[in-house]
Amino acid sequence: MPIVLSPSAGRIAAFAAHPDDVEAWCAGTLALAVDAGAEVRLLLVTSGDKGSADPDADPATVAATREAEATEAGRRLGLAEVAFLRRPDGDVEPDRALRADLVRWLRRWRPDVLFTHDPERPLPPYLAHRDHRAVGRAALDAVYPLARDPLAFPEHRAEGLAPHAVAAAWLFASAGADTHVDIAGGFDRKVAARLAHASQTPDPAALPAAWRDRHAAIGAPVGLALAEAFTVLTLG
């Protein structure tokens, strides 16, 4: 499998289902892209309002906490923007309404590259979160062909949004990954961003070593000390 550099120039968007998804799967690569001059933005489809082990927790409070954590994580990574769709956690559907919203953000941000979940061969096999699968599917449908085609969602013209063609999609959490990125230079910021999600981190002292082991295992087959892996789709 090839070893490639992080995308380096222009604009990058990441569409993820929950706060802390990009930290788990692609934040090292995004940190390196920021270092190389890319303008990176993140859209979170849900705010993780079910992300608490407390049965008496208020979902609105959980969501507000997790949005604040995601905003701080984005600051630590150097992201230009973190935005929220606030779909219900656990109930995301890859329907027309979601496709329209994702196309709108593609036309607004006009990225050269999109990072999102692999909807076809997701990790973990068989047990991948349904929101991950739904967001990945809607994101790829939005990228091709909808955001590109002027007759798709023509109502966007009234918002001043023109069609936009994305050059490539990088799919994370992919059981079919065909590309590795050396993230040694971005690993510390990846961990720092993940630790911003304090409500989701029961043992922050143990996380850095556990993640170092995890990303060493990802890199081992291609001789990298620390890596993230992707399925990369080049779009027409």
Image: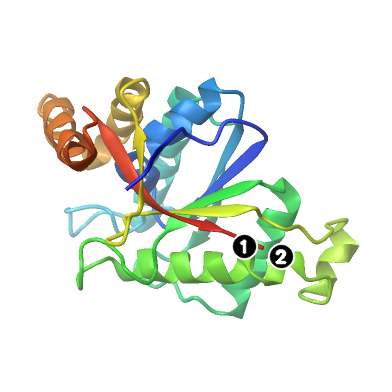
| Amino acid type, mark 1 | Leu
Q: Residue at x 57, y 31 (%)?
A: 8
| Residue 102: mark in rendering | 1
Is there a contact, CB below 8 Å, between mark 1 and mark 2?
yes
Q: Position of residue 208 (x, y in %)?
A: 17, 26
Rate crowding at label 1 as few (under 14), some (14 to 19) or many (20 or more) other CA atoms within 10 Å.
many
Dividing the picture into quadrants, the one containing residue 29 is top left
Q: Residue at x 12, y 27 (%)?
A: 209
Is 60 situated above or below 219? below
The residue that disc 2 covers is 147
Residue at mark 1 to residue at mark 2: CA–CA distance: 9 Å
Q: Residue at x 25, y 54 (%)?
A: 57
Q: Confirm whether residue 20 shows in the render.
A: no
Dividing the picture into quadrants, the one containing residue 2 is top left
Reading the chain from its start, which is encountered first: label 1 or label 2?
Answer: 1
Q: Residue at x 65, y 38 (%)?
A: 11
Colour convention of the picture? rainbow
Of the pair 152 and 155, the residue shown nearer to us = 152
